[in-house]
Amino acid sequence: MNFIQFNPLQETNPGAWLFIFEQMLNTARIPDAASTKQLEKAAAAGQKLILTPTEDASFIRDSLSTSPSPVVRSFWRVENLVRIPYQLN
């Protein structure tokens, strides 16, 4: 989590930082029925799946909610309000 929260990219290259942060957020999201079906279909087709929902999602969510970074906490508050499901990229 420190890699994201205190990464100098947040200041030097915000677009790159945001991309990495978004990928990490996505792995901490809970897949809805449609996302689960997509994952199952992709796996059955033999697609290589990376950055899928992780078993560490609750740890990630807890860490984000207590982050010392106001930027990270702000993004996490939006995630909790909107409840975006996992998205297969």
Image (cartoon, rainbow, N blue to C red):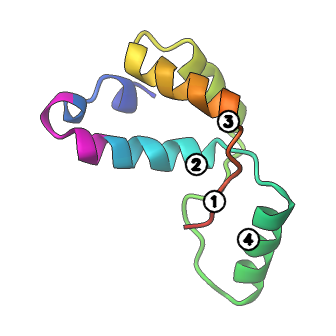
Q: Determine whether the residue tagged by mark 1 lies in a helix, strand or loop.
A: loop
Q: Residue at x 57, y 21 (%)?
A: 63
Q: Residues within 10 Å of mark 3 (few under 14, many from 20)?
A: few
Check the image and report above or below for 71 versus 13: above
- Say the numbered circle drawn on residue 82: 3
Q: Residue at x 55, y 58 (%)?
A: 51
Query: Counting residues from the N terminus, which is met first, the one under dot 4 or under dot 1?
Result: 4
Give the labeled residue for mark 1.
87
Magenta residue span = 11-17
Query: Counting residues from the N terminus, which is met first, the one under dot 4 or under dot 2?
Result: 2
Query: Counting residues from the N terminus, which is met first, the one under dot 3 or under dot 1?
Result: 3
Give the labeled residue for mark 2.
26
Residue type at mark 1 is Gln
As measured in the structure, the alpha-carbon distance from the residue carrying label 3 to the one carrying label 2 is: 13 Å
Give the mark toward the camera: 4 or 1: 1
Task: Give the camera-side residue of 35 and 56.
Answer: 35
Residue type at mark 4 is Leu
Give the labeled residue for mark 4.
39
As measured in the structure, the alpha-carbon distance from the residue carrying label 4 to the one carrying label 1 is: 9 Å
As measured in the structure, the alpha-carbon distance from the residue carrying label 2 to the one carrying label 1 is: 7 Å
Is mark 4 in CB contact (under 8 Å) with mark 2? Answer: no
Query: Counting residues from the N terminus, which is met first, the one under dot 3 or under dot 2?
Result: 2
Task: Give the camera-side residue of 8 and 78.
Answer: 78
